[in-house]
Structures are given as structure tokens and as C-alpha cells.
Amino acid sequence: MLGPRTLAAAVLAALVALAPVAFAAPTAKDKAEAKQLWTKGKQASVRRKHDEAAASFRAANDLDPKAQYQLDLGRALVETGALVEAEEVLSGVVDTTEPNTQKAKAVAKKLVSDLGARIPTLKIVVRGPDAAKASVKVDGNAAQTDKDLRFDPGSHEIQASTPAGGEASQSITLAEKENKTVTLTLSPPKVVEAPKAEESGSGGNMIPAAISYAVGGVGLGVGAVLGVLAFQKTSETEELCGGKVCPQEYADEVGTAQDYGTGSTVAFAIGGLGVAAGLILTFTVGMSGDSPEADAEKKEAHVEPVVGPGYVGVQGSF
């Protein structure tokens, strides 16, 4: 079993072995390439191409982090107007532990002090419905409200929105050393109205009443026809029989006359019920408004009588 000292030594050895992997130092090639990029950046600065210079200094520092590269990057960023990032980079130079950088640190400290007075501040105040729940963005990035925030000079887009749909936006321009407060007033949440059902100009749905009237009319018509047929058939049978008692050979004729009579009675009964039902529906259901479902189901009713030996009725579609 390993003792405490032996275990500690083993852990230390492991950390030392891993250190080159976790914190790999720049290679000679990296340093040479970084030096070339730094030189390129200096040349761009002389030509006042500050965006190009900043890109070269940034690339050089990525390959071989050095206080001098960071100092020159901060200077170039100041020239491009990226004051907030420049302050961050230069503050890193002030806090560096790199040896022999006293001069760079002093210059960086002076620049940071100057930037503190130049960088403008912006306070965003949100008013209106659900203002406490509003989320705010400046140039597409989340921002806090009711606090002095530091932004680069120039144009900025401010947007505020709430979960309920309230919105507000404003375009502003910040000047160096300016301390600005912007108040956004949220619009009322958007209310989506449900589509209104179309009103029917014809009152209630009269189709059931119309069907009842149709059935009643057909029933009455069929009853009348069968009544006439029954009367005629009865007359013919009486002539054949020569009296009220018929021979057996005329039994079919007598049965047909009776069927016509029965059918006429049934048809008149159906017709009467149909007309009565139509009247009831007219004065009850007919006065109510049609529902969308009833409108969708409306179609032409078709009714026709069916008459045959021994039966009578109606058929059709409703």
C-alpha cells in the first residue's frame, strides 16, 4: 500500500506529465508565424487600415499570446471604434504576469483609463403591460434593463417583447462619453379574434318542416288516389257479383278493392301526421338559427309515393 508521501509524489508526477498536453507552449513555427502576422499588422496600422491590422494582431496573439501583441490589438480596436472589446483586451495586458512587460503594462493602463471616460452607457427602461416579464435585446444580444450598460459608440437597435405578444423597438445612436436612457413602451398584447359564424338570413333550419310537409302532401295525395281506385274497384266488383255477396271466383277482386281502401286510409293517416309534424316544426324549430353543422347537411329532399297490390307507402332521400 502506498504511503501518503509516495501517493502525493505520484499525483505530482502525473500532473507534470499532463501539463505539456493541457498547456502546450507555442512551437518555434508558431512563434515565427506570429511574428510575421504582427509585422503585417504594424504595416497595416501605418496605412491606417485598422480593421486589417486588428485581424493580424488577433491572429498573432492566438498563435503566441504576448503582451505586445495584445497591446497592439487593443490600440487597433480603439481605432475601429470597438471600445468595449479594446478595454477588455488592454485590461488583460495590465493584469499579465508575463516577465519584462512593465512598459506595455503602463501604456495599457493609461489607455484603459482613457477608455473608461470615452465608452458611452445606455440604460433601458421598459414600460407597459407585462413590462416585468419583458426580454430585451440590443443588436440581437440579450441585455439587462434599468442598469447602465456599456456599448460602443454608433448606431444600435433595441427590441423588447413579452410572452403575451407585447412589443417595442427603437433605433438609437450613442456618442462617445454619452450617458443615455431609453424608455420603451410596450404595445398591448395582440388579441386574435375567433372567426364569427356567418349569420343565416332565413331564420331557423326549415328543412325538417319542409320534409314533413312533403311526406304529408304525398300521403294525402296517395290516399286520394287509392280512395278513387278503391271506389272504382268496389263498384266493378259489385257489378260482377250482382250483389253484396260474391262467388269464390271473384275473391281476388274483392281483396284488391279492400286493399285499396285500407291503403287509402293508411295514406291519409300518414299525410295527416306529416302535415301536423310540419306545422309543429314550423312554429318551434323553424324560428331558431341554423347551426354550421345543419347548414353543412342541407340538401334537397326527394319523396315519391310507392303503390302496389296490398301495400302503399313513400320512399326517397332526406
Image: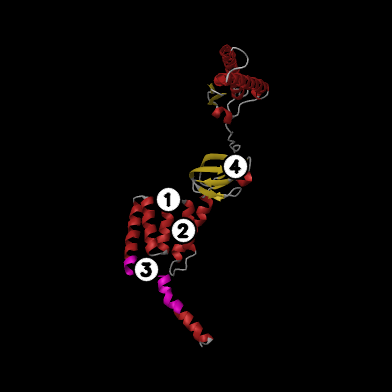
The kind of residue tagged 4 is Ala
- Mark yes or no: residue 105 visible: yes
Q: Which label's residue is closer to the chain start, 4 or 3?
A: 3
Which label number is shown at residue 89?
2
The secondary element bearing badge 4 is classed as: loop
The kind of residue tagged 2 is Val
The kind of residue tagged 3 is Pro
Q: Which label's residue is closer to the chain start, 4 or 1?
A: 1
To which residue does mark 1 refer? 79
Q: Which label's residue is closer to the chain start, 2 or 3?
A: 3
* Rendering coords of residue 246 (x, y %): 59, 17
To which residue does mark 4 refer? 164
Count neighbours of disc 3 (C-alpha within 10 A) and say few if under 14, some if 14 to 19, many if 20 or more. Answer: some
CB of mark 1 within 8 Å of CB of mark 2? no
To which residue does mark 3 refer? 26
The kind of residue tagged 1 is Glu
Measured along the vertical axis of the image, is residue 298 above or below residue 61?
above
